[in-house]
Amino acid sequence: MQIEINNLVVTYKNNVALDLKNLTIPNGGAYGIVGHNGAGKTTLFKSLTNIITNYSGEIQIDGQNVRDNPAILNRVGIVLDGMSVYMNQTGWFNLAYFSGLRGEFNREQARTLAAEIGIEAVLNQKVKTYSYGMKKKLILLIALLHQPELLILDEPFRGLDLDTVQWFKTYLQKLISEGSMTLLISSHVQSDIEMFCKSVFVIDHGQLRETIDLATESDKKLRVVDTTDNVKVQAILTEMAYEHEVLADARIQLSIKDPKWREVQMKLIDAEIEINEIGVLSALDNKLN
Amino acid sequence: MTIQRIVEMEFFKFFHEKVYMLVFGIIAVLNIIFTLVLANAQSLPAELYGNKTFGSFMIISIMLLIAANFILLYWYPFHVLSVDYNNDVLALMMASGIKRKHLFYAKLIVTICLSMLAAVVLLLVPGTLLVIELNKNIEMLQLVFSSFMNNFSWYYLIDLILAYITTVTLMLLACTWMRGAKKAILVFIGLTWGYRIITSFALLVIPTIDVNEMGHYLAIYGIQIIAMILFGYITQRIMAKQNL
């Protein structure tokens, strides 16, 4: 499903929480939404799914204005961090109710998926007896049950046990590889974003700061180098016109894919400079820090 | 998603509320028992019928039961209207593709239907028993029936129906405004009070009321319909702006 956002402005009590001029998220594949706390990620997700409708501008999913034609959300699944269900009812009730709102409830399909996620055994219990992780699994199950074409996940792995995280990651990889679904994911764990996404939208103070093509960025093979004399290394690199960047902690970031990298190494040996560490700085880290 | 679908799922939800079902069941059974006891009071053993303690017990019990019926019938619509806010599930509902306007109409329909159903469950059997008891005394039944028919008018019935729908619309407004908090009841009382004052004032200044009975009722209907539309509009505006 393709998402198109035009001049979307969301304000909370005169504070602009989100101000996106134009943003298009193409159909198919996984896309990350990253940014610091309060950047506007959750507000964006809520606006996409009509949880917030008090905004100016327009959001279209597959050409349908979401606010005017919310029926399009029948094909969208969402898991937000603070979402809730009927606490005094059982898991089965909640599955039947929320699936029923979207159409038919397939009990057998729900049972199979619940067994895979690991909550089948508790579905007869009231949700108020569930742990945080269990409740999140139930909401995840509700989101997945109608086989969404667009899946929106806000911090999806937080609060889940390792087995479920592993299962969920494999499940998402499978869905993405089938090419049938568009995934929109936000996570503070950047390795999660890098695992799934081909593009990442960086939101800062409610505005789209940058779009990162992770496939291109990872081709650069960026590394962070820490040596016994970083100042001298910096001088050598400048002299050789070797593209680099000095980080806030004085370490040097450069690409080891550059053909001159071997020459740099030789010069460092000649200058008796030892390399303490060559670390990996992900493309996303680089853009966010 | 159609209003019909939302209504179906709302009924599914409320018929799964075991606690409320149980409470309604218990009160309904108590209503029947006390009606039977009252209807057959003269047939009770003399030591009970003339016993002061038993008499006091019956009076207090009946008063408490009437209060319980009243509270339950009054409270239940608020519960129906606020349960989604209290469980914080509106986000998930909206994300399922529900139009807020459709939810408004569905809530209105469901609240009216469930409130009427609740009244039937609580009062139908005792009411029927009462009629049967009166039937034993034909003169009494005729008196009640003729009194009812003399005072009955279709105008009054329509007035009652419109007043009830306006009341539910006001409840929906209060619950939406207060996001399902208990203070919605106080807001509802306040709004009702204000509405009554304005209605009374409007009826005083509208000249048709002096013309005839029909004119009087038409004025009341007009005010009620305007109030319904206004309260409904305000509720929908609040709903549309709410960040869930």
Image (tube, rainbow, N blue to C red):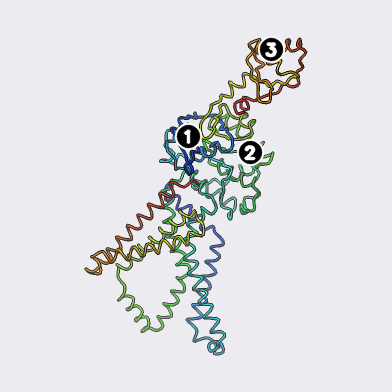
Which chain hosts label 1? A
Q: Are the residues flagged by discs 2 and 1 from a single subunit?
A: yes
Given the image, on which type of amino acid does mark 2 rest? Phe
Residue B89 vs residue A267, the one in the foreground: A267
Which residue is rendered at x = 32% and y = 68% of the image? Answer: B156
Q: Quadrant for residue A139, please give it.
A: top right
x and y percentages locating residue A212 in the rendered image = 56, 25
x and y percentages locating residue A168 in the rendered image = 63, 37
Q: Sort mark 1 into few (<14), some (14-19) or many (20+) by Cα contacts within 10 Å.
A: many
Q: Which quadrant is home to the C terminus of chain A?
A: top right
Q: Which residue is mark 3?
A: A236
Marks 3/1: CA distance?
43 Å
Mark 2 or mark 1, earlier in chain: 1
Residue A274 vs residue B18, the one in the foreground: A274
Q: Which residue is mark 1?
A: A19
Which chain hosts label 2? A
| Helix, strand or loop at mark 2 | loop
Q: Residue A157 bears which disc, if any? A: 2
Which chain hosts label 3? A
